[in-house]
């Protein structure tokens, strides 16, 4: 591997044409978390420009009433792509990129737990981005909005392949995000440096760690929904087609069960950045570390149960409206606690107004507005007026831009010196900041009032009603300020990278571990770690006379859990979310039976026989594992082969069942039962097949040579996966085959 | 000028929401002022000066934290209580049978009055002072009925009828539009609600029930013939015209009595009607009405016929 | 019967419950005397009595699924938690019962208490038969206690470590939320008894009319109770775990090092 170069060397090298080719390849094949992080952020920057230009066109079209600048379809494609791009290709990659760079440094690790998985996760982003944008060449970009409400997103109403590309691209991006989350969790649990106990984690790391769990639970739900949508569109299923027994409201439940946690997936990293920057520039520790840390957990857990507030106008019925109002209002409490803690950190400090801090202060005030208008959406009757209006647009842009983008810009200004070895220009940074503040507020404050005056979102033009014209014009004007800010930012990044002031190890006098190494850090991150006894190891070194109190017990001697085990268990959690969604969708339609084939078509006794084969394969795998531990090669190979055979028999049984159903004229498109049945069992079968392939690879490796050296934990990890696939089948068997017998 | 201003409620339903908005607005403003005040105070009071050492390191205060967890909790409880009350006032349970059924189509609205049998499109007439029980349906994708001055918004979901109440205190014209993205021409799926004194409403209703009768002339007769022989009747209904009873597209029985064409995109004048018939895809690209390529003469006849259907 | 009349008169002075509570109180003081934490025990007793004598009991008894669900939640989550908190530090399980202190058994008991008793047949039986109802109550209290033991056992050493406790609680919360979702969105009655109640107290018209609780809506509220407020109990417990984690002090030896 040619990965021992640092960014500084890279910078020198790209000035030398002879070395360029070599470095291009080195960056494409890299598995170093710092380089991957930079790739994440550059990709996000690229798509930020793309999404920004889309926004510019949207606002130009809306600048005056009755405008004919853009065709309505073009406009609809633009806002769909703008939303999708900004969320999945800008905010998520950039926050993942920052975490990818800083998190391993903050805990004193040499890299992420799974460097190659890390590279895979990153490459999902450009791949997904290309897929999404390829739709433009393949018959038109998706024009269904970033949440693709069914049935508009179904084939009868959107026949061009845009929605298909949208779904596949998001599926790919979802897989990338999940792999990053698995990596984050495994890194934090298994790779912490000596003395860095869980209780001493810097807040940036802690909040990103908590955030990874939201990703693990939320993204699989989206992926399950996308799978259903694609099955509808490509295989004539009808999950969400009302005239074939499907439910468009179910799509909304699934989408927002992902979509609301997604808001926090983007916002928590912003909180993480702010929780790092505000203390450093106030020269005080964060006020109430425990409360900021715990409120993140509260937000993470609650975020999974508040999605219904996106659906107050869809007619869920009074009980659901009330309960979702309660849970949505409650999530305001931990969020409020955070804002107050950040404010209290500033009080009594010695505040330095460098650019990172400026962004964080603007973040605080703008996030306050976003939070308040957010509560107004939990106050159900207010939502009944403002939902789907420009008030809502203003609200979530205050979250997405006013809070998240501002925090990220602060974070980039803060960590750029660590990444490049050079400071970003403070002057240009201040220009960016003030232009952003002016432009952002000019664009979005007025939109609250537009919404109250009755302007709905997603209209390509509007009649010349009183005040609508000048308000929209003002809003459009603001975009030019933001565009100027973005141009200056890009210019600043480019010029400072080559000519910026040399930063030194710790330009901000910060206290976390990433500042204890060189800027940029060497490939292995640290030559030696300083002693870690509190949450601010560098403060303790700089202030030996007044060190921070020691936090918790020193667990230097404790061995951390095996990262393979943590990784596979986390992966299994995400898979459980995926199958859980499919199972719930199955039950949803099972409880609403319709004419045509139903569970009575299934041959339960035969399925039981094949199920026993699958369950037996868990036992044989365990025997094989015992063989490996006891170094008995023959026993291990034999039991493993038997496992594969049993899994294969199960698959044959399933194929046989499908075949019989096809013979009687039942296929996926017949009715809701067949749609849900084939989807659920089909995805399980696919997982069995993937498991079999994995086991075959192990068999081959074991057959070829020595298996004892260090691969034991990988073999165990595959075992966890295999057992999990069996456990899923227990649930499928009970739900699909046994439940109808009981009732 | 008619507006769709949510801050100018014109019915007890919309007023319930508005009042709640004012109460919560005050709460929100107080929160904003207090927290922003603290931030601004910190900015001016705790600005770092050259050479100052780092301040006292305060890691937190449990009592303060508990206080600012409990206070937001109490605020939330207060808002919740207010919310529950306003929900009941703004959206009471539905009546057993609806007074009005509003069905969303790509990209227009159909209004049925089950009591009288009137069917019209895009322009909904209601009597003042009387709450109407409205059922919302959709024939294709999701739409959303939103007339901010009169009542809450609610999605028209295909296969799941929803319910709202609709009421206006005073006679007047109240506008709104579809607020759930529904496809290419989502922007031009506007709603006009005309509230009249009950007696005037009854009059309107009686007039609507009459069969469609154009002014008697040679041109209108030819227009009617064209309407019947072209494919118009495959989608449009005109009561009293043989064969024209499908309602895939707006009912045209009294189309000339309506103020606007094509769900609000143009005023309903004979000249505009002619433009619309000539090239609907030019005026409203993506609307489901195709270009028929009528000759100028045919256009004149059809326009003459349709624009006298009062 | 009007709402006011109902809430003033529908108190059921169930003699068995009163006698059992009195016996439990006597037993508690005889066994633990001054060592226990009688405040918690008193609270547990009050909640327990409220579950059975308050008008909610009358509602749960054949009228409202949601009232039944409220009882269920109080009996699985609140009463056992208070009981465990009332135990003295010296309390520990004796040999055959120590099996109950395995985390997996605790988890299965806690989640099983929710799922098992909402199988339509069992749910129906518990509402119609007094014997089954007694078994249900006992099992809920027992299973709830076994569940909470992992988190609220009298001695720190008997409890799960805070991070493990968080995982334990979160997964249990998820498992119960899934059931809550199923109940909320099920178009068919999970507990058919509540669909057409026998109107023993003449309350049905008030419930259906004045309160606006149709049987569909009733079941939805029941499901939502299991989904949202119950999850909030788990979330509170998770936050308590975090508080416990962060408040465990640094060992003395290290302080001297510093």
Image (spheres, coloured by chain):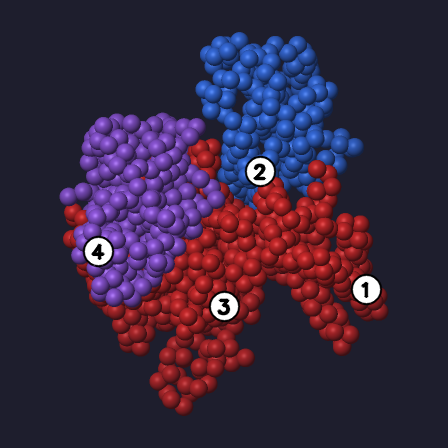
Chain colours: A red, B purple, C blue
Q: Nearer the viewer, mark 4 or mark 2?
A: 4
Task: Answer yes or no: are tags 4 and 3 on the same subunit.
Answer: no
- Dot 1: few (<14), some (14–19), or many (≥20) neighbours within 10 Å? some
How far is the residue under mark 3 from the one under mark 1?
Answer: 35 Å
Disc 1 target residue:
A642
Q: Nearer the viewer, mark 4 or mark 1?
A: 4
- Residue found 56% across the figure and 19% down from its top: C59
Residue at far front of view: B218
Q: Nearer the viewer, mark 2 or mark 3?
A: 2
Pinpoint the chain carrying mark 3. A
Image position, residue A171 (x, y; %): 51, 62
How far is the residue under mark 4 from the one under mark 1?
Answer: 87 Å
Q: Secondary structure at mark 1?
A: helix
- Residue found 33% across the figure and 71% down from its top: A422
- Asked whether residue A422 is in view, the answer is yes
In depth, the one of A12 and B308 nearer the eye is B308
Pinpoint the chain carrying mark 1. A
Disc 3 target residue:
A124
- Dot 2: few (<14), some (14–19), or many (≥20) neighbours within 10 Å? many
Q: Is residue B232 left or right of residue C238?
A: left
Disc 4 target residue:
B219
């Amino acid at each position: 591997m040619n990965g021992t170069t640092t960014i500084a060397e890279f910078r020198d090298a790209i000035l030398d044409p002879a070395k360029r080719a070599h470095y291009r390849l080195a960056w494409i094949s890299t598995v170093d978390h710092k380089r991957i992080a930079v790739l994440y952020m550059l990709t996000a920057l690229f798509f930020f420009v793309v999404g920004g230009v889309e926004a510019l066109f949207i606002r130009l079209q809306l600048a005056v009433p009755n405008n004919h600048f853009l065709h309505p379809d073009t406009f609809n494609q633009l806002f769909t792509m703008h939303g999708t791009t900004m969320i999945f290709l800008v905010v998520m990659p950039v926050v993942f990129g920052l975490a990818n760079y800083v998190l391993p440094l903050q805990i004193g690790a040499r890299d992420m737990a799974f460097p190659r998985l890390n590279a895979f996760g990153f490459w999902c982003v450009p791949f997904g981005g290309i897929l999404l944008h390829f739709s433009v060449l393949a018959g038109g970009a998706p024009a269904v909005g970033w949440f693709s409400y069914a049935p508009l997103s179904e084939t009868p109403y959107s026949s061009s392949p845009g929605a298909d590309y949208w779904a596949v691209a998001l599926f790919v991006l979802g897989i990338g995000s999940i792999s990053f989350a698995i990596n984050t969790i495994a890194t934090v649990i298994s790779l912490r440096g000596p003395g860095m106990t869980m209780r001493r984690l810097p807040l940036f790391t802690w909040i990103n760690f908590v955030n990874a769990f939201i990703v693990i639970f939320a993204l699989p739900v989206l992926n399950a929904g996308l799978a259903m949508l694609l099955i509808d569109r490509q295989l004539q299923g009808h999950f969400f087609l009302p005239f074939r027994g499907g439910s468009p409201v179910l799509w909304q439940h699934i989408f927002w069960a992902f979509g609301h946690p997604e808001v926090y997936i983007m916002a928590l990293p912003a909180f993480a950045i702010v929780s790092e920057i505000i203390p450093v520039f106030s020269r005080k520790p964060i006020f109430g570390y425990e409360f900021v840390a715990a409120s993140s957990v509260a937000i993470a857990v609650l975020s999974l149960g508040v999605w219904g507030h996106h659906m107050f106008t869809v007619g869920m019925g009074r009980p659901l409206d009330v309960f979702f109002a309660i849970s949505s209002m409650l999530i305001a409490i931990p969020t409020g606690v955070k804002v107050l803690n950040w404010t209290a950190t500033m009080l009594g400090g010695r505040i330095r107004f460098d650019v990172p801090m400026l962004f964080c202060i603007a973040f605080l005030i703008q996030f306050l507005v976003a939070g308040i208008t957010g509560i107004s959406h939990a106050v159900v009757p207010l939502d009944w007026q403002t939902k789907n209006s420009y008030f809502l647009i203003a609200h979530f842009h205050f979250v997405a831009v006013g809070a998240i983008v501002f925090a990220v810009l602060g974070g980039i200004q803060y960590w750029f010196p660590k990444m490049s070895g050079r400071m970003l220009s403070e002057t240009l940074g201040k220009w960016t900041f003030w232009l952003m503040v002016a432009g952002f507020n000019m664009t979005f404050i007025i939109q609250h009032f537009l919404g109250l005056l009755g302007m709905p979102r997603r209209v390509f033009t509007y009649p010349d009603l009183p005040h609508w014209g000048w308000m929209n014009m003002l809003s459009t004007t603001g975009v030019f300020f933001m565009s100027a800010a973005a141009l200056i930012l890009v210019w600043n990044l480019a010029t400072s990278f080559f000519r910026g002031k040399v930063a030194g190890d710790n330009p901000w006098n910060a206290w976390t571990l990433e500042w204890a190494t060189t800027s940029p850090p060497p490939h292995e991150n640290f030559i030696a770690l300083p002693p870690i006894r509190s949450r601010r190891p560098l403060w303790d070194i700089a202030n030996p006379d007044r060190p921070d109190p020691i936090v918790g017990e020193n667990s230097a001697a404790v061995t951390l859990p095996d990262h393979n085990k943590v990784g596979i268990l986390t992966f299994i959690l995400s898979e459980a979310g995926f199958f859980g969604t499919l199972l719930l969708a199955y039950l949803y339609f099972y409880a609403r039976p319709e004419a045509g084939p139903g569970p009575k078509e299934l041959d339960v006794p035969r399925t039981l026989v094949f199920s026993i084969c699958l369950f037996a394969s868990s036992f044989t795998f365990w025997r094989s594992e015992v063989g490996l531990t006891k170094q008995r090669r023959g026993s291990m190979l034999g039991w493993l082969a038997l496992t594969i055979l049993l899994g294969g028999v199960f698959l044959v049984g399933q194929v046989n069942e499908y075949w019989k159903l096809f013979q009687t004229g039942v296929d996926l498109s017949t009715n809701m039962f067949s749609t849900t049945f084939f989807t659920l069992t089909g995805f399980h079968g696919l997982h069995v097949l993937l498991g079999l392939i994995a086991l075959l690879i192990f068999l081959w490796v074991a057959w070829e040579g020595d298996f004892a050296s260090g691969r034991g934990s990988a073999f165990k990890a595959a075992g966890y996966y295999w057992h999990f696939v069996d456990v899923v089948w227990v649930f499928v068997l009970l739900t699909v085959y046994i439940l109808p017998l009981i009732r | 000028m008619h507006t769709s201003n949510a801050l100018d409620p014109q019915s007890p339903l919309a007023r319930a929401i508005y009042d709640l908005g004012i109460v919560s607005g005050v709460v929100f403003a107080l929160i904003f002022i207090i927290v922003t005040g603290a931030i601004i105070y910190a900015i001016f009071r705790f600005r770092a000066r050259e050479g100052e050492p780092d301040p006292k390191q305060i890691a937190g205060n449990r009592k303060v934290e508990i206080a600012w967890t409990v206070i937001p909790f109490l605020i939330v409880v207060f808002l919740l209580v207010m919310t529950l009350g306003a929900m009941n006032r703004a959206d009471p349970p539905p009546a057993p049978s609806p007074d009005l059924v509003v069905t969303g189509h790509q990209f227009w609205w159909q209004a049925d009055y089950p009591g009288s049998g009137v069917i019209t499109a895009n322009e909904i007439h209601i009597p003042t002072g009387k709450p109407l029980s409205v059922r919302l349906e959709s024939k294709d994708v999701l739409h959303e009925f939103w007339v901010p001055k009169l009542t809450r918004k609610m999605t028209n979901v295909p296969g799941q009828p929803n319910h709202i109440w609709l009421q206006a205190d005073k006679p007047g014209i109240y506008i709104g539009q579809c607020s759930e993205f529904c496809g290419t021409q989502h922007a031009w799926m506007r709603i006009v609600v005309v509230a009249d004194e009950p007696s005037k409403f009854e009059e309107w209703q009686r007039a609507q029930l009459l069969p469609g009768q154009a002014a008697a002339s040679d041109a209108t007769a030819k227009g009617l013939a064209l309407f019947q022989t072209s494919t118009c009747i495959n989608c449009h209904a005109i009561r009293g015209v043989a064969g024209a009873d499908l309602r895939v597209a707006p009912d045209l029985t009294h189309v000339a009595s309506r103020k606007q064409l094509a769900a609000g995109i143009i005023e309903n004048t004979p000249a505009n009607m002619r433009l619309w018939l000539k090239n609907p895809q030019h005026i409203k690209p993506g609307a489901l009405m195709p270009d028929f390529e009528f000759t100028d003469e045919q256009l004149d006849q059809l326009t003459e016929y349709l624009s006298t259907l009062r | 019967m009007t709402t006011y009349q109902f809430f003033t008169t529908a108190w059921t002075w169930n003699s068995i419950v009163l006698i059992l509570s009195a016996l439990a109180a006597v037993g508690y003081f005889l066994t633990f005397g001054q060592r226990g934490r009688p405040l918690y025990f008193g609270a547990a007793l009050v909640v327990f009595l409220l579950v059975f004598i308050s008008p909610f009991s009358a509602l749960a008894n054949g009228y409202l699924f949601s009232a039944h669900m409220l009882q269920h939640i109080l009996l699985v989550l609140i009463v056992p938690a208070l009981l465990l908190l009332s135990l003295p530090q010296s309390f520990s399980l004796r040999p055959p019962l120590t099996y109950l202190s395995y985390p997996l058994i605790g988890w299965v008991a806690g989640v099983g208490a929710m799922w098992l008793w909402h199988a339509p047949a069992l749910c129906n039986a518990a509402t119609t038969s007094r014997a089954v109802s007694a078994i249900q109550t006992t099992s809920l209290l027992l299973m709830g206690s076994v569940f909470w033991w992992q988190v609220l056992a009298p001695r720190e050493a008997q409890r799960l470590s805070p991070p493990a406790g968080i995982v334990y609680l979160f997964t249990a919360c998820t498992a119960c939320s899934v059931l809550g979702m199923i109940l909320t969105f099920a178009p068919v009655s999970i507990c058919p008894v509540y669909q057409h109640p026998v109107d023993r107290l003449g309350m049905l018209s008030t419930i259906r009319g004045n309160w606006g609780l149709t049987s569909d809506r009733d079941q939805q509220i029941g499901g939502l109770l299991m989904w949202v407020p119950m999850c909030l109990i788990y979330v509170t417990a998770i936050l308590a775990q975090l508080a416990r984690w962060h408040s465990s002090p640094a060992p003395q030896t290290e302080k001297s090092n510093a």
